[in-house]
Amino acid sequence: MKIVVDTREQAALDFSRYEAVVEPGTLEVGDYAPAGLGHLCAVERKSLPDLMASLTRERDRFERELRRARGLDAFAVVIEGSLGQVRQHEYRSQAKPHAILQSMCAFSVRYGVPWVWADDPAGAAYFTFHFMRHFIRGAEARYREIIKAHGETATG
């Protein structure tokens, strides 16, 4: 699989364990997308410090990104940390854990975004690769059915 990593991504995930070719590119939404399918599928990656910033001082910018992501068939936010770390306030921001988690819940409902706790960069790479792999497999099956139906209509 060919993975596009947004050029603004500062420290790209390591996909060397997977059958993946990584190339830089500009994505409209998210940090990672299957090549040629960024308009349909993307993953936004957040470290804990980045998550805190996205839900506090950079909230407006992040919310605009979530609005853009609503147009995708598949989108997720993968977090390099754990729910326990947030609940125990194991981050530098002064934002209260309850406020952070309530923002995540509200954004989940408002924008239909799933949040995936991946623990660390290796977990984030695992989730990102397999999320996109499953999307591609599903898209291939969906389009195969559409093409088959179109072919039957055209010849029948």
Image (cartoon, rainbow, N blue to C red):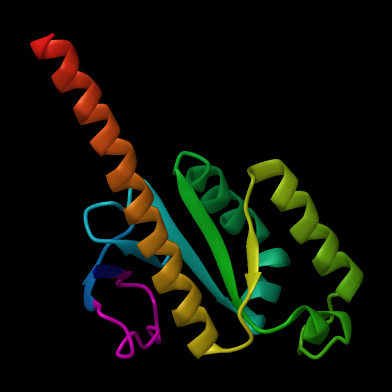
* Residue 60 visible, this angle: yes
- Seen in the picture, residue 22 relative to 31 is either above or below; the reply is below
- Seen in the picture, residue 33 relative to 69 is either above or below; the reply is below
- Seen in the picture, residue 21 relative to 59 is either above or below; the reply is below
Closer to the camera, 147 or 104?
Answer: 147
The N terminus lies in quadrant: bottom left
Q: Residue at x 59, y 58 (%)?
A: 62
* Residue 58 visible, this angle: no
Q: Position of residue 32 (x, y in %)?
A: 38, 67
Q: Position of residue 130 (x, y in %)?
A: 43, 70
For residue 8: magenta? yes
Residues drawn in magenta: 5-20
The majority secondary structure of the magenta stretch comes to: loop
For residue 30: magenta? no
Q: Quadrant of residue 89?
A: bottom right
Closer to the camera, 87 or 156?
Answer: 156
